[in-house]
Image (spheres, rainbow, N blue to C red):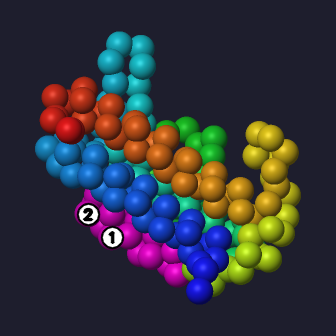
Amino acid sequence: MAKTEALVLVEMYEKTRLLTRYYLSKLKEVDPLVSQGSGDVQFNSIYWLMAHLAWAENYLVVEMTGGKSVAPHWMNHYSLGSDGSVHEGHGSFKELLDDVKVVHEKCMQYLATLSDEDMAKENAGKFQFGDGDATCRFSVQHAIRHEALHTGHLSLIAKLNKQKTV
């Protein structure tokens, strides 16, 4: 039996998350609350990046495809266009990573239930991604691209901290 589009996208997301976790593992000795960069170029903190990835995954994979949010409300602080600050009161970095893991698992469980017909529907926000594509399919595809982009930030932070990555 052929896999649904959603199941293929779940597999792709999981592979992307493995890469995110790999680069994150190279940053254990780096303060997750400190913005990293070189010269005039600064990245958001590791804490912010991980919270933002969880917010975006929930928003793009679940909410934009018509589902009910699976993320804690405080993650909205890390939404598109936020100021890059770390919102206080969410606990330690370990607690954040636990929340990120739960959000990811719930998002993947939800995504796996979507049919090819669901994926072809217009996304809930009617948001057009660059080329005018406003489907639920492209919202999920964009979530995967978005994660990979920020995984690149984590890899650069690792390099800035002289961590061997390959």
Image coordinates of residue 85 in percent, x first then y, are 46, 42
Can I make out residue 111 in this image?
no
Q: In the visual, does 165 lie left or right of 55? A: left
Disc 2 element: helix
Image coordinates of residue 24 in percent, x first then y, are 27, 50
Q: Hey, what amino acid is under mark 1?
A: Asp
Residue 105 within the segment the image draws in magenta: yes
* Residue most extreme to the front: 1
The magenta stretch is 90-110
Q: Which residue is disc 1 drawn over?
A: 98
Q: Main secondary structure of the magenta part?
A: helix
Q: Hey, what amino acid is under mark 2?
A: Lys
The N terminus: image quadrant = bottom right
Q: Out of 156 and 86, give the one closest to the viewer.
A: 156
Q: Out of 71 and 104, give the one closest to the viewer.
A: 104
Q: In the visual, does 7 lie left or right of 60? A: left
Q: Which residue is disc 2 drawn over?
A: 94
Image coordinates of residue 98 in percent, x first then y, are 33, 70
**What residue lies at 41% left-to-right and 31% top-to-bottom?**
43
Q: Given contact means CB atoms under 8 Å apart, are the residues at marks 1 and 2 in contact?
A: yes
**What residue lies at 64% left-to-right and 77% top-to-bottom?**
4
Residue 45 within the segment the image draws in magenta: no
Disc 1 element: helix
Which quadrant of the figure has residue 152?
top left
**What residue lies at 20% left-to-right and 38% top-to-bottom?**
166
Q: Out of 50 and 129, give the one closest to the viewer.
A: 129
Image coordinates of residue 26 in percent, x first then y, are 20, 45
Can I make out residue 84 in this image?
yes
Q: Out of 92 and 46, give the one closest to the viewer.
A: 46
Which quadrant of the figure has residue 31?
top left
